[in-house]
Amino acid sequence: MDENLWLVVGLGNPGPGYAGNRHNVGHMVAAVLADRLSANFKNHKTNSAVAEGRSFPGGPKLVLAKPSTYMNVSGGPVAALLRFYSLEPDRLIVVHDDLDLPFDTLKIKVGGGHGGHNGLRDIIAATGTKEFVRIRIGIGRPPGRQDAADFVLHDFGKDERAILPTLLTDAADAIELIAAEGVTAAQQKFHSP
């Protein structure tokens, strides 16, 4: 196993109809990172689109992946990617939307439950562990009585879209910091008020 290698999985749903959805914020972060690394996503035999690169010469190698499956069945591709790259789950960073965090909030954690997130639930089931890094990107709660499933499958609103690029950049920065200096360093930087 390459100790300088991290697997970064951005969760979302496949296809252009879902591209701007709140549920696809993980895919969006992976795209920001791929642009930084001048890496292009290519179809991979793990049922994912994969891009690889380094933030700086000699720095950690990042394998960026967007499962080609729907969110609720992300576990198979993630487990296959870990096997393909001979990585343990402690080298996995999963980027996902989080209804329980206000919009424009970023939290980093290791382990824990799935919190009702079906993508995380499937990854935990497929890998047999909860012990991986999560980048939780707050999308807020649905307004009024709107169903949560309906809310996550809608695009960000106009005001949110104005702030979204900064949020995606912060998440990409956090991932690069985790890979270079560890989770604690990233938490200290991004969890401070």
Image (cartoon, grey):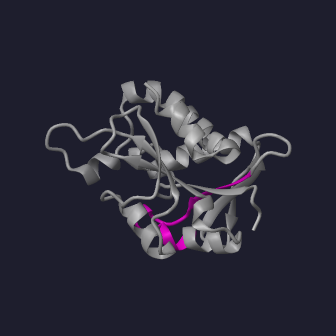
Q: Residue at x 77, y 50 (%)?
A: 53
Residue 60 sits above or below residue 163 on the image? below
Q: Which residues are magenta?
A: 61-77
Estimate the x, y position of residue 134 in percent, counting from the top left: 49, 52
Q: Quadrant of the C terminus?
A: top left
Write down the quadrant of residue 101 in the picture.
Answer: top left
The residue sitting at the right extreme is 57
Estimate the x, y position of residue 177 in percent, counting from the top left: 64, 40
Query: Within the magenta stretch, is there residue 66?
Result: yes
Query: Within the magenta stretch, is there residue 65?
Result: yes
Q: Residue at x 14, y 43 (%)?
A: 145
Of residue 136 and residue 109, the one placed in the foreground of this image is: 109
Residue 150 sits above or below residue 72 on the image? above
Q: Is residue 168 visible?
A: yes
Of residue 185 and residue 156, the one placed in the foreground of this image is: 185
Q: Quadrant of the N terminus?
A: bottom right
Write down the quadrant of residue 119 in the picture.
Answer: bottom left
Residue 48 is left or right of residue 96, and the answer is right
Q: How many marks?
A: 0
Residue 108 sits above or below residue 165 on the image? below
Write down the quadrant of residue 185 in the picture.
Answer: top right
Estimate the x, y position of residue 111 in percent, counting from the top left: 45, 58
Estimate the x, y position of residue 116 in percent, counting from the top left: 30, 59
Q: Residue at x 47, y 75 (%)?
A: 128
Of residue 132 and residue 168, the one placed in the foreground of this image is: 132
Q: Is residue 73 visible?
A: no
